[in-house]
Amino acid sequence: MNVFHIVGARPNFMKVAPVMNALKTRKQVIQALIHTGQHYDANMSDVFFEQLGIPAPDVNLAVGSGTHARQTAEIMTRLETALLDGEPDMVLVYGDVNSTVAAALVCAKLGVRVGHVEAGLRSFDRTMPEEINRLVTDQLADLLFTPSEDGDVNLQKEGIPAERIFRVGNVMIDSLVKLLPAARRQNLNGLPERYALVTLHRPANVDDGAILKRILQSLLEVSQDLRVIFPAHPRTRKRIADFGQHSGQVQIVDPLPYLQFLGMQSRATVVITDSGGIQEETTYLGVPCLTLRENTERPVTVSLGTNVLVGRDPDKLRSEVSRVLAGEAKKGTIPPLWDGHAGERIAALLTG
Ligand code: UD1
């Protein structure tokens, strides 16, 4: 069986690694990796390949950045050629980025079977570009691999036949389980005993100057009680510069490689974020997570994990940070099947 994996953006490198690894041991499988080039800076892409042990892509479509339509269209055009050349039996797509939906569309039109890894997640907020990507990808996929029960329920409500849905657990947690010991050995000299680790990149939080300013102001207030370290996505850094905003005591640094970031997460007093994957990682690690969003497509991180949605309410953020500092942070448990073996379960389903 000839399997193609399509990735393009940072969060999906952690998801493809365990699936490729698990399929490597299956004799009947030949794998190829296609990088769309949606993310291209070394610290957004290459460093993840090195640390996660992912082989160099067989094809790099080098699409780069653009508006959603332009980026999606460019991926589709270039990917169609690669798929016609490679003739895969099965294409695996990951997560909810533009590369994911573009690949699913091309495969559906070419009649190539698609498996969606991390299917069924829903924020029910269509102003979020990723929600559109999730809805379309899941409608087109032949096999839907979900991380948690809510995913199965959402898909069935949308009319996806139950026999196409497979609850396999969380592949991103596979990478975490494997690399946590190495992450804990990272030299994190100079880090204070207690700190808040911040990431922000959602358009809804960073593209509007007034909103971004309010968030930075809240972080400045947090920094009076707790050091705030903020590895900033290029998009966010650009916005902070464009809007001429001051970050004061908030320590803004470049995006971090996987191991360093995981090491920092595991030791953080609290994580403040708008990322999806980080809500999951903190839940696994048992680290308090305050999410600067009104909703989440990963509700188990709230119902079972350490995640608290604070929206964009500065008072709520401050009061939740105070709770953490007072030793009253929300306690959580690890969701079922987030056990480091999701990739193996996918490999077994594909080849069994
Ligand atoms: C994308 C995903 C988002 C995911 C995020 C993780 C979509 C719709 N969004 O958002 O779901 O959570 O990746 O990072 O697919 N840029 C660089 N260097 C890079 C990549 C991007 O400088 O290597 C800058 C460019 O200015 C670019 C901007 O970041 O325009 C946004 O990049 P893009 O891939 O369009 O979206 P993300 O915000 O990264």
Image (spheres, rainbow, N blue to C red):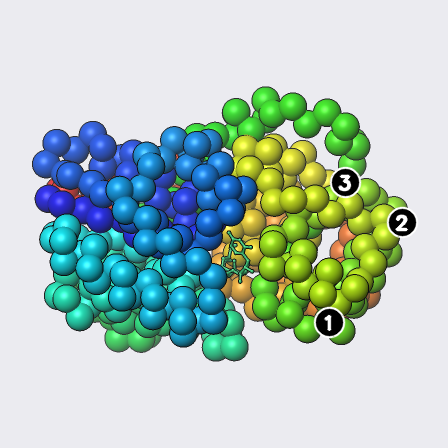
What is the x, y in percent for residue 333?
A: 54, 44
Q: Nearer the viewer, residue 324 or 201?
A: 201
Q: Amino acid at mark 3?
A: Tyr
Mark-to-mark CA distance, 2 and 3: 11 Å
Among the two numbered marks 2 and 1 on one chain, the one whose residue lies closer to the N terminus: 1
At 33% across and 63% down in the image, what residue appears? 75
User: Label 2, on which residue?
Assistant: 224
Mark-to-mark CA distance, 2 and 1: 23 Å
Q: Residues within 10 Å of mark 1 (few under 14, many from 20)?
A: some
Q: Amino acid at mark 1?
A: Gly
Q: Which mark is residue 209?
A: 1
Mark-to-mark CA distance, 3 and 1: 26 Å
Q: Amino acid at mark 2?
A: Gln
Q: Residues within 10 Å of mark 2 (few under 14, many from 20)?
A: few
What is the x, y in percent for residue 3?
A: 18, 46
Disc 2 under 8 Å from ligand 1? The reply is no
Q: Are marks 2 and 3 in contact (CB under 8 Å)?
A: no
Among the two numbered marks 2 and 3 on one chain, the one whose residue lies closer to the N terminus: 3
User: Label 3, on which residue?
Assistant: 195
Number of the front mark, 3 or 1? 1
